[in-house]
Image (cartoon, grey):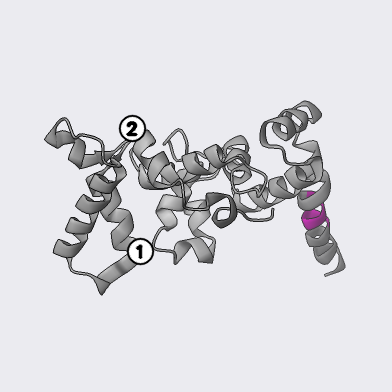
Amino acid sequence: GINAEYGIHRQTKSSEMGQTQSSLPPDEVARLCEQTSFSRKQLLRLHARFSRLDKFDVGYLSTQDFLSIPEIAVNPLGLGLIALFDVKRNDQITFEQFCTTLSAFRPEASVADKLNLTLRLYDVDGDGVIQKPELYRVFKFMVGANIEDEQLDKLCDKVIVDSKHGREIESAEELEYITYDDFKWAMSNAQLQSKLSIRI
């Protein structure tokens, strides 16, 4: 009993303290600190959380690992949130990707970083534009059954047209997507700096 308890205690302690520090080489810590603006202490704390989610110790997180977090599992946009971390779209989220994505949520992060993060939430296939079906999908998650599909479709059309901010539409195809510049303009008054900020 004592040995078992001690073993558990030792394992928890090493995974949260010693193991976290030893598994992150000093040069990697320094590089990530510079890349993300997290402090060394914050990075080690994030690595401890990352390691707890990485139950099989494979060095990356999958969609299933993230879905073990109840708040994400029940969130209608849960898969979209996970996709923010999965930059390479291979369902293997490394610690670097984990930190880089979280760094955009820092209050000190630039508006451009927060804008890119928001764009990726909508841009599911990662092609750099928000297609109408992608816009529809996010809106559907947000409003659920509170609005008829036909009304939602019209709302998507209106949002796409409004995003062109009055410039001339050259082809019908332009009404099927929102470009990065259109999205940037549409989000210019969205107060992303405060709305997309969390303390790590």
Residue 109, by quadrant, is top right
For residue 61, above or below residue 73: above
Residue at 77% x, 52% y is 16
- Percent position of residue 65, x then y: 52, 52
* The one of 117 and 173 positioned closer to us in this rendering: 173
Callout 1 amino acid: Met
Q: Residues within 10 Å of mark 2 (few under 14, many from 20)?
A: few
From the image, which quarter does the N terminus lie in? bottom right
Dot placed on the residue nearer the N-terminal end, 1 or 2: 2
* Image location (x, y in percent) of residue 74: 44, 67
Q: Range of the magenta residues?
A: 10-14
Residue type, label 2: Asp
Q: Is residue 102 left or right of residue 167?
A: right
Is residue 11 magenta-colored?
yes
Q: Secondary structure at mark 2?
A: loop
Q: In which quadrant of the rendered view does residue 94 lie? A: top right
Residue 163 percent coordinates (x, y): 30, 44
Is residue 199 rendered to the left or right of residue 124? right
Residue situated in front as seen by the camera: 82 or 50:
82
Q: Is residue 57 left or right of residue 134?
A: right
Instruction: Count neighbours of disc 1 (C-alpha within 10 A) and say few if under 14, some if 14 to 19, many if 20 or more.
Output: few
Residue 5, position in %: x, y?
A: 82, 66
For disc 1, the marked residue is 142
Which residue corresponds to mark 2? 127
Q: Taken as a whole, is the magenta stretch helix, strand or loop?
A: helix
SS category of the residue bearing label 1 = helix
Identify the residue at image location x=22%, y=52%. Answer: 158
Q: Which corner quadrant of the image does residue 137 belong to?
A: bottom left
